[in-house]
Image: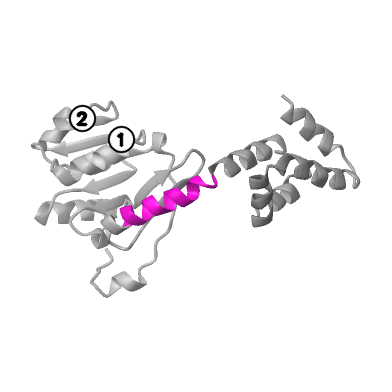
Amino acid sequence: MHEVNSEDIPGMKFLGISLIACKIRVGIIGGGKAAFIKALSIAGRDSEVEVLSPNFFKGFYGLKNENVKLITGEYETGFIKDKHLVIIAVTGEDEERIIKDCEKANKLYLVCSDFRKGNFIKPFQDNTKNIFFTVNTRGNPMGAVFLGEKVREVLKGYDDFMDFIIKVREKFRGRRIKKELMKYVNSEEFYRIFKSGRHEEVIKGFLKDEGNKGGNEEEQFSADTDR
């Protein structure tokens, strides 16, 4: 296991991935408030969560989420066998034992007592209608929430724009024009055109120019948008 200290934080690098939540099984060892907060957040994204502990924080008993299963008992290695992610919300010897088990089984694991002991963290995450994003501030969760709220307000201004581009992308999936069209519409210039309300007109002009090189993409776009 990689040993960490305070000098690791400034140079620590992170790898961002997005998991398909409904296909992920998560195991949480510990029944305290930290475990409850993690379970609530993860289950809310439709992942399956099993929480193992001899006893549970009172909030668990009022949690109405079919994705959360409470298991009363002590930790055994077999608990993590079918889990994609493991969250360790205990301390002391139990924590060290579970870390070793996770390392041996090549699990992704988060350690609540000190994120530097684990090999993944759970950043602040939020979304607009079409944009999902995360914010990681290197160990400052409240700072991540503060910045995340600001980021969300900015991204909301691009939501309708992204919605339109996603629809255009789907209409031209598999067609020869797609690459050039996507390069054109995903730009600051086209965003300004979109805000002016001339986006469909301009795309038709773009497709007409490309159509002169072969193909009838303008007619197809007109047919699609008229539906």
Q: On residue 138, which mark appears?
A: none
> Which residue is rendered at x = 27% and y = 46% of the image?
86
Q: Name the residue under label 1.
A: 43
The answer to which quarter of the image holds residue 75 is top left
Q: Which segment did they paint magenta? A: 144-158
Q: If you read the primary sequence from the N terminus, does the residue marked by circle 2 or circle 1 appear first?
A: 1
The N terminus sits in image quarter = bottom left
Determine the CA span between mark 2 and mark 1: 10 Å
**Residue 120 visible (yes or no):** no
Classify mark 2: helix, strand or loop: loop
Residue 211 point in image, percent of width and height:
87, 43
Residue 109 point in image, percent of width and height:
28, 51
The answer to which quarter of the image holds residue 64 is top left
User: What residue type is disc 1 on?
Assistant: Ala
Residue 21 higher or lower than 149, as above or below: above
User: How many neighbours does mark 2 have within 10 angstroms: few (below 14), some (14-19), or many (20 or more)?
Assistant: few
Q: Is residue 226 magenta?
A: no
Q: Is residue 134 left or right of residue 156?
A: left
Look at the numbered discs 2 and 1 and tell me whether their residues touch, using CB distance below 8 Å. Answer: yes
Q: Is residue 153 magenta?
A: yes
**Residue 93 visible (yes or no):** yes
User: How many neighbours does mark 1 have within 10 angstroms: few (below 14), some (14-19), or many (20 or more)?
Assistant: many
Q: Name the residue under label 2.
A: 63
Q: In this view, does 69 lie to the left or right of 154?
A: left
Residue 187 point in image, percent of width and height:
65, 55
The answer to which quarter of the image holds residue 161 is top right
